[in-house]
Amino acid sequence: MSKASDSSANSAVVVGSGFGGLAAAIRLQARGYNTTILEMRDQPGGRAYVFHDQGFSYDSGPTIVTARFLIDELFALGGKRTSQYVKIVPVKPYYRIVFSDGQTFNYTGDEDDTIEQIRKFNPDDVEGYRKFLAQSQAIFNRAFTDLADQPFSSFGDMVRVAPDLIRLRSHESVFRLVSRYIKHPLLRQVFSFNPLLIGGNPFEASSIYVMIHYLERKWGVDFVMGGTGALVDGLVKLFTEMGGRLRLNARVDELLIENGTARGVRLASGEEIPAKIVVSNGDVASFYKKAVPARTRRKWTDRRLDKMRYSMSLFLIYFGTDRTYPDLAHHTIVLGPRYKELLQDIFTKKILADDFSLYLHAPTRTDPSLAPPGCECFYVLSPVPNLAGKVDWEWVKEKYANAILESLEKLCPDLRKHIVSKIIWTPLDFQRQLDSHLGSAFQFEPILTQSAWFRPHNVSEDVKNFFLVGAGTHPGAGIPGVLSSAKLLERVLPPDPKAPEAS
């Protein structure tokens, strides 16, 4: 076994190079820590990995960029501007929502446009929407602006905000709150589906998450030219220019602990890397179960983790065509004939239904360079049960993929005849490739009793000098959430890397 020799007092290790890990590493490096990112795969990015096949480039994970100021902050920490590394452009409409009966709703974020779209379905819901928007703004102002980058390290932190959470009806589900204001059944779907983007069931997710509607309206929905992977590359370049180090194919097997304090990590190769600070951007349940010795865990025991509710998984098809479909929007939400019942199949019954709702990403509508000339690049996503269900994914995946692609021919004529590149991902791939517990795509389900203080804390409750960022900690999944989880490290780390250790 080899052992690293550099045990300097200002060293930090970040496990994982997803957006949370990259943001944490940049902030640590700017703070004066000698920071190393350890990534188990052959590319940086975590869930924002990029697949390349026959001239097509596929962003494998997050594609919806909003709250861009959080990205700008990272480049500013290195004395740079975002525009020096990537080009970010707005997307309009934000989403095109297509219903099973063929009706569509184009959501642009513009209030007048939104109201005109609402009038097509039910003029009586216009006033209700205005009230809903006001409620979404009020929740956003408290839950995101005030609390997204605040650590919930003690129960007192939760008690202090409890009156506001009660006043804002956070105990209700997103769908129930939306239904207070909007009556048309299809419009209720339009304004309640957003929790699915962060792994939540609209009928179970806390109404805190209606803030997503106002967040998108305030800052828009953007796209990074070159794909989300171009943003990963830009952040890696910034980090290394700041003096940080990225190591690929470096899987962490164990968090090294002495007297209850993190002292570094051990790699699968046996190499030990000492560090004063260790930050994990990995799947929280998997990291605790596999890398943190059970004898050191009093709160996040295997039993406690097994009792948590995990988000659904995803079935994804990345595919390229030898023709283009210029009538498509960049982001299309295709809602199936069932809404609540389908979500019950996914989240509660954990069975694979015959019908589905889909998210179709067509990035070449904005950036044709992601595909060969005259071709189109896509991914389509179907929410499906995580591996707590008993679906035989190896047996069913080709049949299920064909059913999805056949259904998309309503939007893309003769689609299957024109596919020249295809990659399929199932919940098994989330488990095998991303080390995701139960193949969950977003870690913990965002219900009220798994939010804020109730989630694994950004400052580990079990090990000193061990910190968590990413979707499995506060404030949660989505690019704004994971970037905010890294931002709040500023509040809990020592003010100087050579200061006394964090408690």
Image (tube, rainbow, N blue to C red):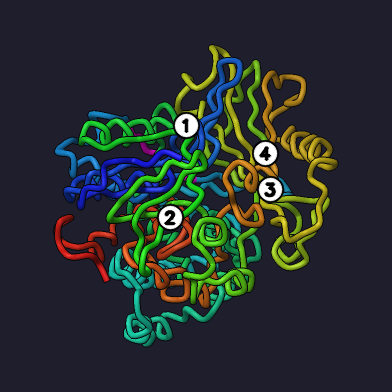
Asked whether residue 182 appears in the rendered view, the answer is no
Most frequent secondary structure within the magenta stretch = loop
Give the Cα separation between the discs numbered 1 and 3: 20 Å
Compare marks 1 and 2 and give the one earlier in the sequence.
1
Q: Residue furthest top?
A: 373
- Are the residues flagged by discs 2 and 4 in contact, CB closer than 8 Å? no
* Residue holding disc 2: 470
| Mark whose residue sits in front, 1 or 2 | 1
In-image side of 80 versus 304 (left or right):
left
Q: How far apart are the two marked residues, 3 and 4, measured between alpha carbons?
A: 7 Å
Q: Is residue 306 visible?
A: yes
In the image, what residue type sits under mark 3?
Pro
Disc 3 residue crowd, few under 14, some 14–19, many 20+, Cα 10 Å: many
Between the C-alphas of marks 2 and 4, the distance is 22 Å
Give the numbered dot on residue 425: 4
Question: Which one is in front in this view, the residue at disc 1 or the one at disc 4?
Answer: 1
Place residue 290 in its image quadrant: bottom right
Residue at x 41%, y 38% (from the top left corner): 2
Q: Which dot, 1 or 3, sits closer to the camera? A: 1
List x then y, in percent, for residue 362: 55, 32
Residue that label 3 marks: 427
Q: Which residue is drawn at the image coordinates 60% and 58% (left, top)?
A: 121
Q: Position of residue 436 (x, y in %)?
A: 59, 52
Q: Which residues are drawn in magenta?
A: 87-94
Mark earlier in primary sequence (1, 4) = 1
Q: On residue 43, which mark appears?
A: 1
Marked residue nearer the N-terminal end (2 or 3): 3
Residue type at mark 4 is Trp
